[in-house]
Amino acid sequence: MATVSIIGTGNMGQAIASVVAKGGNGVQLIGEADKDKQVTGEIVVLAVPYPAVPQIIAERGEQLAGKIVVDITNPLNFETFDSLTVPADSSAAAEIAAALPESRVLKAFNTTFAGTLASGEVGPLGTTVLVAGDDADAKATLAGVVSAGGLKVIDAGALKRAREMEALGFLQISLAANEKISWTGGFGVAA
Amino acid sequence: MATVSIIGTGNMGQAIASVVAKGGNGVQLIGEADKDKQVTGEIVVLAVPYPAVPQIIAERGEQLAGKIVVDITNPLNFETFDSLTVPADSSAAAEIAAALPESRVLKAFNTTFAGTLASGEVGPLGTTVLVAGDDADAKATLAGVVSAGGLKVIDAGALKRAREMEALGFLQISLAANEKISWTGGFGVAA
C-alpha cells in the first residue's frame, strides 16, 4: 500500500483523495492550517493553484526530497484566460522540477476536470489520467495508485511533454469557461 | 452551396474532401500535378505537411487573397517526434497568417486523425472539429460545411488558440506513434 499526501483541499485535492482511497491506498490531506504537519506519503500531490506552489516549495522543499511530487497545475493567467504564465518554451512542471532537484517530479491530473475524476467518466468514455515524467519507476508507482482507483492511465512520455499537457489543460479550461463544453466533460481519450 | 478547394491529396485531404462532399458542398481536389489549376473555392484547405506550405504560398499567394484559408498542419519535427518546428510562442497558423495578410486564416482539422474524419467517430463519441480564427464569418462558413458533413464543430476562439491546438495535435500524434492510442482514436470531445 502507498500513502499519498495531498497538499490542497479544494475540488481537485478532494477528487484525487477519493480516487486514491477508492484504490485502497492511504491518503494524507494537508490544508492551509496544517503548516506544521510533515508530509508522510511517498507520493506528494501539489493540489494548489500554480501561484501557491513557490510558497509550498519554500516551506516544504526539504521534506519533498526523495519523494514523488505530482504537479497538477494549469498555470493560466486567470485575469485574461488568454495565456499561460510560464515561459512559452517551458512548463509549470519544468519550473517545479528545477526548484526541486532532489524530488522526482511528475505531471498528471491537469487534463481531467475534478468532476471527471470523481465520476470516472468523460461522457461515454472512462476517465484517463495522462502522466508525464522522466522517472519510469515514479510513473509506474503513480499509475498503480490511479488505476487501483478505477481510472485509466496513459504514460504521456518525458516531463517535457508537460508543456503540451498544459496547453491541452488550458484549451479545455478555455472551452469550459466559454461554455463550449461542460466542467464535467472535456477531452476524453479513446484508445 | 460552398466550394472547398483542397490542396493535397493525402489521407487528410481525402478525408476532408469526403466530409465536404457528404454535406452536399463542392470539392476541388488539387494535387502536385495540378500546378496550373487555379483554386476556385472560397474556402481553401492546405492539406499538406507544414514544410510544404511555403512553396504553396509562394506559388498561389495571390490566388488566396480574399479567401478563407484553412491550416490543418501539425508542425512536428518528424525526425525526433519530440518537438515542434515553429517558435515556442507562435504556431504554424500564426506563421501562415503572417505570410497571407489578405486571407482569412483558420486553424482546423489538426486535432482529428483522418480515420476519425472518415468514420465520424472517436470511439463512442462523435468526431468534433475544433476551429480557431480571428474572423467570425469565416469560422461560421467553415463550421457550416463541416456540420453539414455530419461532424460536430466547436469554436475554439481566436487564432492564437492555434498554439494550444497544435500542442494537442502533437501530443495526440506522439501517443499514437508510441502505441498508447490508435490512429483511429485519440482525444474526443464530450460536451
Image (spheres, coloured by chain):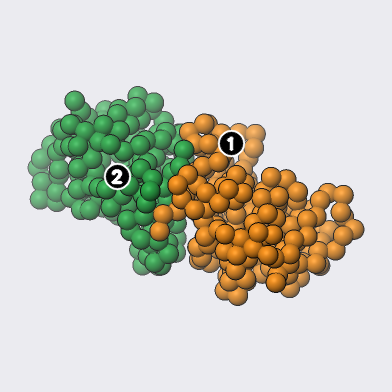
Chain colours: A green, B orange
The x, y position of residue B31, in whole percent, is 81, 51
In the picture of the structure, the residue carrying the numbered disc 1 is B81
Q: Residue at x 32, y 56 (%)?
A: A184
Give the SS element for disc 1. loop
Which chain does the residue under circle 1 lie in? B
Q: Are marks 2 and 1 in contact (CB under 8 Å)?
A: no
Q: Is residue A82 left or right of residue B74?
A: left
Number of numbered markers = 2
Would you place residue B117 above or below residue A70 in this image?
below
Q: Residue at x 18, y 31 (%)?
A: A25
- Name the residue type under label 1: Phe
Which chain does the residue under circle 2 lie in? A
Q: Residue at x 25, y 47 (%)?
A: A118
Seen from the viewer's position, the closer of residues A112 and B141 is: B141
In the picture of the structure, the residue carrying the numbered disc 2 is A120
Front label number (2 vs 1): 2
- Name the residue type under label 2: Gly
Seen from the viewer's position, the closer of residues A173 and A149 is: A149
**Of the numbered discs in the image, which one, if any, rests on residue B46?**
none
Q: Residues within 10 Å of mark 1 (few under 14, many from 20)?
A: some
Q: Which residue, as the protein is rendered here, is positioned at the far right?
A: B36
Q: Which residue, as the protein is rendered here, is positioned at the far bottom?
A: B137
